[in-house]
Amino acid sequence: MPHDQPLTGPLSGLKIVDLTAVLMGPSATQMLADLGADVIKVETGAGDATRKIGPQGDAGMGPVYLASNRNKRSIVLDLGQPSGREAFLRLVKDADVLTTNVRPDGMKRLRLTYKDVAEVNDRIVYVSMVGFSQRGRYARSPAFDDLIQAATALPWAVAANTDDEPHYVPVNIADRSVGLYAFGIVLAALYSRNQTGKGQQVDVPMFETMVPYVLGDHLYGQKFLPPQGDFGYPRLLAKARQPYRTKDAWVCCAIYHDHHWKAFLEVVGMGHLWGTDPRLTTMTTRTAHSEELNAFVRDQLVLRTTAQWQEALAAADVPVFPMNTFESLLEDPHLRDIGFFSEVDHPHVGKIREMAVPSEWHGTPASNYRAPPLLGEQSAEILREVGYSESQIDQMLQDGITRQPPSGPGGRG
């Protein structure tokens, strides 16, 4: 889809000026762009740091960048220069949303706080994604996914589950989870504006967003005052809670409710244990004996192949699924059925693999695809939209206020 063609979908017509970089912010704004919003990615001359990660990083088109920046347009602006700041204010003058993960002190130095921006657009929703609430002692601390994982005890929980040293969850779980939360915050703030007619600033802190993710499960007995038990949901922390080895691979099964346990025991020829083993009586007793019961299941599942367990357990209505690897996930038959993965010709990178928008809209479908842009690919195009003449754009290029690719689409070479 050409970048000058309007996007379709439930958010079509929404203008978002995106001053975020790396992963948390870009993942949130890509969700908005996927649903039709016009997301203008404002970058420094160096570009988003993720452009440099992995294959094609030297060209500024690395896979981490590509994964979170489709359906956007890119403009380079030097916000430290008066003319760069002026261009930015022109951009936000008719925008619905400004997203930023520049530290608040940085936005203050640039004179682009909510108060500054509201002077030109008092209806704007100003979403500031920060590491920590600005009311506490960590307010000025840096925040990266690893740091937030550590701050919220995730590596400790992994170690408690495995008897190993602490390890980070091998996914950028804080960035992606908080990005999803920020996506919802943007929509809630827009709804509020529709009710009141006024914009506002909303801060989205990573630390405080992730604490309930972790303690929602693991506050456990400490939820009560006075405490009625220790921290930690035993079922989740059981060391034997893991994918189960079969004769030929690995399988996961969720033997959770009473009928699951009764059915599983019948499948393994131990139906007599139901009603006689006190550990199995209730959800409470099963939770208290999670370690032993997981070990029991493990000892049974190693006796048959994954395919045999899938057939037997599915027939007994026991939730079961084989464990994928990265490679087998790409070949997953269900994902193939729905065309989840597609090959796309990126005009500057060649063929790339894309993943579908997971939501399926029946009334206002979003069937958009704009390739993730080169650094500054639409700089001239966007500047024209906010009233700059060709001679003014030439001067801004010459002065380093903006830039575009050597023969960049959206402008002149």
Image (spheres, rainbow, N blue to C red):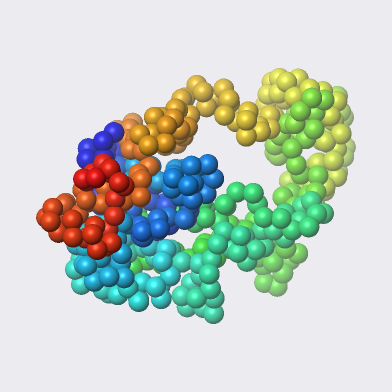
What residue do we see at 63% from left, 28% from top?
A: 328
* Left or right, residue 15 beside residue 293: left
The answer to which of 239 and 113 lies nearer the viewer is: 113
Q: Position of residue 92 (x, y in %)?
A: 23, 61
Q: Position of residue 12 (x, y in %)?
A: 25, 43
For residue 340, say whether it is visible.
no
Q: Position of residue 94 (x, y in %)?
A: 19, 58
Q: Position of residue 303 (x, y in %)?
A: 85, 25
- Image height check: is 355 above or below 393? above
> In this figure, what is the number of numbered marks?
0
Quarter of the rendering containing residue 344: top left
What residue do we see at 62% from left, 34% from top?
A: 326
For residue 82, say whether it is visible.
yes
The answer to which of 261 and 239 lies nearer the viewer is: 239
What residue do we see at 24% from left, 57% from top?
A: 397
Query: On the rendered image, what quadrant is the C terminus found in?
Result: top left
What residue do we see at 41% from left, 76% from top?
A: 105
* Left or right, residue 64 beside residue 83: right
- Image height check: is 253 above or below 400? above
Query: On the rendered image, what quadrant is the N terminus found in?
Result: top left
* Left or right, residue 52 beside residue 281: left
- Image height check: is 12 above or below 249? below
